[in-house]
Image (tube, rainbow, N blue to C red):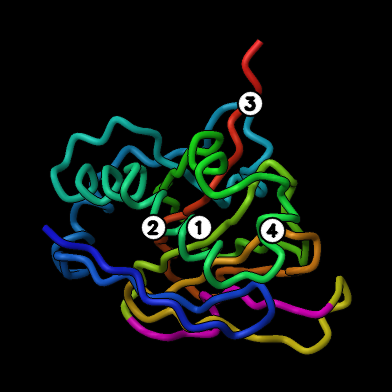
Amino acid sequence: MTYQLQYQQVRPQVWQIHLDMPYTREQILPELEAQPWGVIPNSPDSWLNLRERLCPPFHTPIMRDIHRHLCSPEHRRSIIDYFYDNVPMFQSRWGMDRETMFQQTFAHGDFIRDLPGFHQDIHTDYRLLVATGMIYLTDHDNPGFSTSFYDDREGNNPTRITTNFCDGWWHVNDGSPWHGGHNATDQDRYSIMIALTLSWPSK
């Protein structure tokens, strides 16, 4: 089973991406719909109970394989190499070379269901997240499902990310990629939240 991530830079530190994967939406959707979705207890990320998140282990083969790939050392190595090769000042900004970055981070991919009415205000991410992204599991491009990136908190100069199946985005978290998203439709929005995250220092 092969995966390939395509990048197209659309703003400084922001990429529209597309994940080529060995599954169709028709194969994935029944597994998603059969999951025991629910709000994680005491989670600050429930958004009025309109965001639901699945935690591993996954017991369905397709979801297990997708999650394995997105969390794999090979995937983490490829995205770190891409950022070091294509983002000026990335190494000096984080104060570590790419090998140290590889040793001090982990990659993850969380399956998400956002219910109709979900809304995420314009924000930036916290600094333990070196990079954050999303892969849409929706079946077509719909502005009602989309995330947009902006110049500032007021939402100036928007760049909308398309939501075709396996479209998505990556951004390097450097304080400036203001972004927000929503589910302004009458359907559930399925996606995968991806991230490259700094590990907590060992004691």
Q: Is residue 87 magenta?
A: no
Which of the two labelled residues, at mark 4 and mark 1, occupies the earlier sequence position?
A: 1
The span from disc 1 to disc 3 (Cα, nearest Å) is 28 Å
Q: Nearer the viewer, residue 116 or 85?
A: 85
Residue drawn 83% across and 85% down? Answer: 156
The span from disc 4 to disc 1 (Cα, nearest Å) is 23 Å
The span from disc 4 to disc 2 (Cα, nearest Å) is 17 Å
Report which residue position mark 4 lands on: 173
In the image, what residue type sits under mark 2?
Answer: Ser
Q: In which quarter of the view is residue 88 placed?
A: bottom right
Report which residue position mark 2 lands on: 78
Which of the two labelled residues, at mark 1 and mark 3, occupies the earlier sequence position?
A: 1
The number of numbered badges drawn on the structure is 4
The span from disc 3 to disc 4 (Cα, nearest Å) is 17 Å
Which of the two labelled residues, at mark 4 and mark 2, occupies the earlier sequence position?
A: 2
In the image, what residue type sits under mark 1?
Answer: Asp
Query: Which tag is nearer the camera, tag 4 or tag 2?
Result: 2
| Residue 3 coordinates in the image, percent (x, y) | 23, 63
Query: Which tag is nearer the camera, tag 4 or tag 1?
Result: 4
Q: In which quarter of the view is residue 146 placed?
A: bottom right
Q: Nearer the viewer, residue 183 or 68?
A: 68
Report which residue position mark 1 lands on: 114
Which of the two labelled residues, at mark 2 and mark 3, occupies the earlier sequence position?
A: 2
Please state the extent of the stretch shown in magenta in the rendering: 140-151
Q: Are marks 4 and 1 in contact (CB under 8 Å)?
A: no
Where residue 98 is drawn, which disc sits there? none
In the image, what residue type sits under mark 3?
Answer: Trp
Residue drawn 37% across and 76% down? Answer: 6
Q: Is residue 147 magenta?
A: yes
| Residue 92 coordinates in the image, percent (x, y) | 73, 55
